[in-house]
Image (spheres, rainbow, N blue to C red):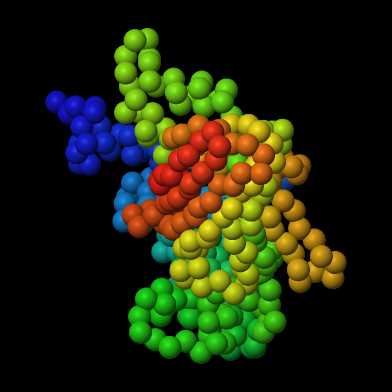
Amino acid sequence: MDNPLSQNPDSTWSQYFRNAELEKMVNQDLSRLYPEHESYFHTPGCQGMLRRILLLWCLRHPDCGYRQGMHELLAPLLYVLHVDVERLLEVRKLYEDLFIDKFDGFSFEENGVAYNFDFKKFADSVEDEIESQGNSKQVMSLYELDPELQAVVLLSDAYGAEGELGIVLSEKFMEHDAYCMFDALMIGAHGSDAYGLGLLNLFLLLLIKEKLLLGSYKLHSLQSKFLFLHPCQVDDGVVLPDEASLYLTAIEDAEYKDDKIEFWNNVYGFDMSCIKKQAMMEPLVDTVDQKQIVTNCHLLKTMDISKMVLGDASFTAPFKLIAERDDYIHAFVAYFDVSFTKCHKLMGFSTGPRSRATHWKQTVLYLEDVLTICEGETIIGSMTVAPNKKNPRDVDIMVKYSLSGRRCVVSRVQFYKMR
C-alpha cells in the first residue's frame, strides 16, 4: 500500500496530490473568467464543462499540462459550440425530413453533443424520393443539389475540417483577425483578401516561433516584432498595458504569522515545524492594510512589455528599505503598477496596498526572522525572480536581506515558490 507521506513521485498518493493541486489551480482561474459575462460563463453547467475539459486535457497531455490562459481560449470555443448546436437544432426543426440519422435533442448543458451529417444517407434518401416520383437521376455530390438543400447540408456539418482550422487560428490570434484569415482561406478563387493573407504569413511564423527562438536563427527586427507583438495588425501595433513596474515594501503582520505559520511549532503538543517550512516557502496573495507598512516602497524593476523577449522575466534586482517608524517586520510585500503610455492620455493603475484593492491584491513573503527595526534604519538586499524550470507558470523567488540595527542584526537568504 502506498504511504501518503511518500516522496516517490510515481506513487498513487503523489499523483493524487498533484491532481488536487491542478484542480485547485483550474478552479481559481475559472472563478475569474470573464466577469463581465458571468451570466453565461459562471453558471454551474458551464463551469463544470470547462473544468472537466481542462482537467481531461491535462491528464491526457502531462508533458504540456495546464498553462495560464487555457481557460480563456476554451471559453469562447465552448460558447460557439453551444450556439452552433442551438442553431443546428433550429435547422433540424425547419427541415426535419432531410435529417435521416438520429440527433440527440437534449439540452447542451446536459450532454456533450457531437453531430456528423452522413451525406451518403442523405443522398440515398433524396434518390429514393426522386425515384418514387418517376425520375431515376442519382445524386452523387453536394453540388448536384439545389442551393437551398446545399445550405442545409453545410449547416449540418459544423464540426468538420473548417471548424478545426478555425480553432487553430483562434489559439494564436484575436477573434477578428482569426475570422479574416479564415475568410481568406475559404474565399478561394472568388476574390482575394490582402489583409487576411498577410495575417496568414504571420500565422506561419507563429507556428515555428518556438523553434526559431530556441534555435540558432538570427531574427530580423521586423520578424521579432511580429513574433512578440502578436496579434499585430499594422507595423506600429501596440501592446496594452505597455509598461509595468514591480515594487517591494515591508510590513508588520504578527497576528497572521502567529496564527497561520508559528502555529505549526506546537499543534496540540506535537512539533510539526517541518510543515512550517513549507508554509513559509509559499507566498500569500492577499490584501494588505496600508497601516501595516513600516518602510518606504522600493522600485525593483520597470519593464517595457512591448519590447520584452524570452529571458526578460528572469532578473535580479537590489533593494533598500528605510524604516519610517519603530516597529517589527514580519514580511516583505511585492506589488506592481501598470501604465498605458500609448494612449492619448496617460493612464494606469497600482495594485499596491495604498491604492484601491484590485483582483491581483498583493504578494506577501513571510520572513523566518522577526526584524526589530528603528526609524531610519535600512534593510539592504536583493530579489531574484525566474520561472520554474518544471512548470513555467510557477515562479521561483530568492530574497537576500540584511539588517544591522541598534536592536537587531541579521543576514539571511530565503527561497519561495509562487504557484
Q: Is residue 245 left or right of residue 308?
A: right
Q: Is residue 145 above or below residue 419?
A: below
Position of 186 with respect to 316 (left or right) is: right
The x, y position of residue 329, in whole percent, is: 57, 35
Q: Residue at x 66, y 33 (%)?
A: 326
Q: How many marks?
A: 0
Q: Is residue 395 above or below residue 305?
A: above
Where residue 315 sits in the image (x, y, percent)?
48, 63
Q: Is residue 101 visible?
A: no
Question: In the image, what residue occupies the spot 41% across and 73% down?
Answer: 210
Q: Position of residue 359 (x, y in %)?
A: 66, 43
Q: Nearer the viewer, residue 387 or 46?
A: 387
- Residue pictured at 75% horizontal, 44% vertical: 355
Nearer-the-camera pick, 143 or 323: 323
Quadrant where the N terminus sits is: top left
The quadrant where residue 216 appears: bottom left
Image point 38% across, 16% down: which residue? 266
Q: Which residue reaches farthest front?
A: 406
The residue nearer to you, when weighing 246 against 372, is 372
Position of the C terminus by quadrant: top left
- Asked whether 281 or 99 is in front, the reply is 281
